[in-house]
Image (cartoon, grey):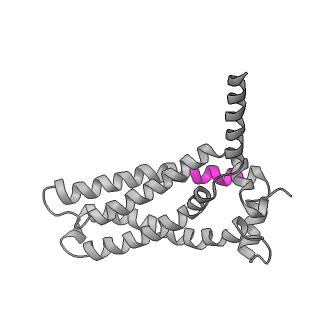
């Protein structure tokens, strides 16, 4: 009898935790894109300040690193526009929305299915960005510390920025393992069941 009570107790705890993400975990999850975008823009500025000079400027290492930094910079600007606007739908009352917020509500928050498609797209992007960021870290380290000849300089701050980003992206993916699409969808105030 005790073992069945314990198993029932464990199941009820699991169902409660899956149905309602913890508040701190939820807010860290929601702020991941904004935090990684800000850190990437800071990393871009540090990278350019340190490496936008000869002889580094003419190296293949610099050109490859610039491709990554440019991609991250562009993604960061887009995310810094999109994600803060979602706050009104996530934690607000979803009233008096601007045109962009209404579009998101109609196209991405229409139902669990459309929301799930957006989550899958984001997951694919994160699973591509994580190994690319790790490769950038390895390449930057190699360029400064292992390579013979001219290479990137002052790479450790950028490696730390990318490590921070990778850790937050990994957190987002792990969070989505623990909380299914239904839990994610209904954690937004705009989608709460009455």
- Tell me the quarter of the picture where residue 81 sits: bottom right
Q: Residue furthest left?
A: 148
- Visible residue check, residue 175: yes
Query: Which portion, as a residue range, is magenta?
Result: 115-125
Q: Is residue 121 left or right of residue 9?
A: left
* Rendered residue at 24%/71% (across/down): 57
Q: Position of residue 114 (x, y in %)?
A: 74, 53
141 or 32: nearer the viewer: 32
Q: Is residue 100 above or below residue 164?
A: below
- Visible residue check, residue 75: no
Q: Is residue 60 left or right of residue 67?
A: left
Q: Residue furthest top?
A: 1
In the image, residue 119 lies in the stretch drawn in magenta: yes
Q: Position of residue 39 (x, y in %)?
A: 43, 68
* Rendered residue at 68%/45% (across/down): 18
Q: Residue furthest front?
A: 2
**Which quadrant of the rendered structure holds the C terminus?**
bottom right
Q: Position of residue 66 (x, y in %)?
A: 35, 66
Q: Position of residue 54 (x, y in %)?
A: 19, 74
**Which quadrant of the rendered structure holds the N terminus?**
top right
69 or 192: nearer the viewer: 192
């Amino acid at each position: 009898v005790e073992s069945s009570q314990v198993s029932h107790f464990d199941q009820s705890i699991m169902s409660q935790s899956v149905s309602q993400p913890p508040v701190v975990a939820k807010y860290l999850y929601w702020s991941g894109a904004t935090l990684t975008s800000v850190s990437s823009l800071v990393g871009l500025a540090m990278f350019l300040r340190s490496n936008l000079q000869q002889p580094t400027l003419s190296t293949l290492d610099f050109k490859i690193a610039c491709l990554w930094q440019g991609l991250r910079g562009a993604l960061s600007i887009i995310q810094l526009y999109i994600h803060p606007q979602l706050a009104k739908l996530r934690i607000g009352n979803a009233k008096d929305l601007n045109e962009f917020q209404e579009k998101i509500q109609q196209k991405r928050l229409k139902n669990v299915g459309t929301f799930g498609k957006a989550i899958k797209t984001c997951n694919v992007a994160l699973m591509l960005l994580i190994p690319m960021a790790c490769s950038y870290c390895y390449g930057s380290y190699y360029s400064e510390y292992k390579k013979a000849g001219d290479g990137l300089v002052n790479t450790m701050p950028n490696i730390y920025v990318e490590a921070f980003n990778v850790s937050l992206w990994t957190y987002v993916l792990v969070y989505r393992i623990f909380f299914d699409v239904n839990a994610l969808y209904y954690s937004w105030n705009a989608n709460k069941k009455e």
